[in-house]
Image: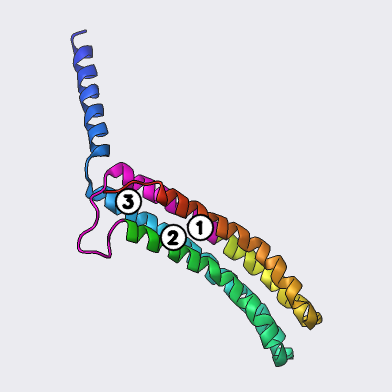
Amino acid sequence: MDSIPAVVDSVAALAGQAVAAIGAVSPIGLAIALAGAVVAAVPAGIGSAIGIGMTAQVANGVLAEDPKKFGNVFILVALPGTQGFYGFLGAFLAIMQLGLLGDAPNAITLWQGIQMFAACLPVGLAGLASGIWQGKACSAGVELVAKRATEGTKAVIFAAMVETYAVLGLLVTIFAQMGIKLG
């Protein structure tokens, strides 16, 4: 029976140390925040690369038949690339807020690092999904342009509807980053 209070005291001491570590300046917090910047940029870039790749494959087939349609299909091929830019912007803003482009990074806690990581997730995940789905919408748009060259604007409008969710992911990331008080 005497060992139960000792165990409770040990657990309480460990819990206190854990709470103190969350609020203390931590190189691990900075590492987690940097991982957040990576999570903002990399998945969004992957989504863009996949979306552009699938659209470019369809566009190349159309251009093999009619090279004059290049101007009509180019915007549809480029459109899924915007998610990569949004992810880069989310990562850049995180890096700026962390002070990594200055003389010394901001001293942040483990909790602030976790917050920055979480703040970077929306643009990365929305960019990944919307880049791929926008590539599918743009591929269908290229097929529309192949049959009816004058309907390219309609294809761009449909593809831009998917873009809305990448923009919303970027906005959530920006607003969440603004809510993190560093330094």
The three-letter code of the residue at mark 3 reads Ile
Q: Is residue 153 above or below residue 131?
A: below
The earlier-in-sequence mark between 1 and 2 is 2
Q: Pointer 2: residues within 10 angstroms few (<14), some, or many (20+)?
A: many
Q: Which residue is mark 3?
A: 32
Q: Specify whether residue 157 is painted magenta.
A: no
User: Residue at horizontal 27%, vertical 38%?
Assistant: 22
Disc 3, SS: helix
The three-letter code of the residue at mark 2 reads Gly
Q: Quadrant of residue 18?
A: top left
User: Residue at horizontal 71%, vertical 68%?
Assistant: 157
Quick one: 136 or 148, which is closer to the camera?
148
The quarter of the picture where the N terminus appears is: top left
Q: Which residues are magenta?
A: 98-127
Residue 175 lies, in percent from the top left, at 46, 51
Q: Quadrant of residue 15?
A: top left
Quick one: 63 or 72, which is closer to the camera?
72
Residue 134 lies, in percent from the top left, at 63, 66
The reply to whether discs 1 and 2 touch (Cβ–Cβ < 8 Å) is yes
Q: Pointer 1: residues within 10 angstroms few (<14), some, or many (20+)?
A: many
Q: Which residue is mark 1?
A: 170
Residue 25 lies, in percent from the top left, at 22, 45
Q: Which residue is mark 2?
A: 90
Q: Pointer 3: residues within 10 angstroms few (<14), some, or many (20+)?
A: many
The earlier-in-sequence mark between 2 and 3 is 3
Q: Magenta stretch mostly in which secondary structure?
A: helix
The three-letter code of the residue at mark 1 reads Leu
Question: Can residue 125 be spotted in the picture?
Answer: no
Residue mark closest to the camera, 2 vs 3: 2
Say whether residue 43 is left or right of residue 64: left
The reply to whether discs 3 and 1 touch (Cβ–Cβ < 8 Å) is no
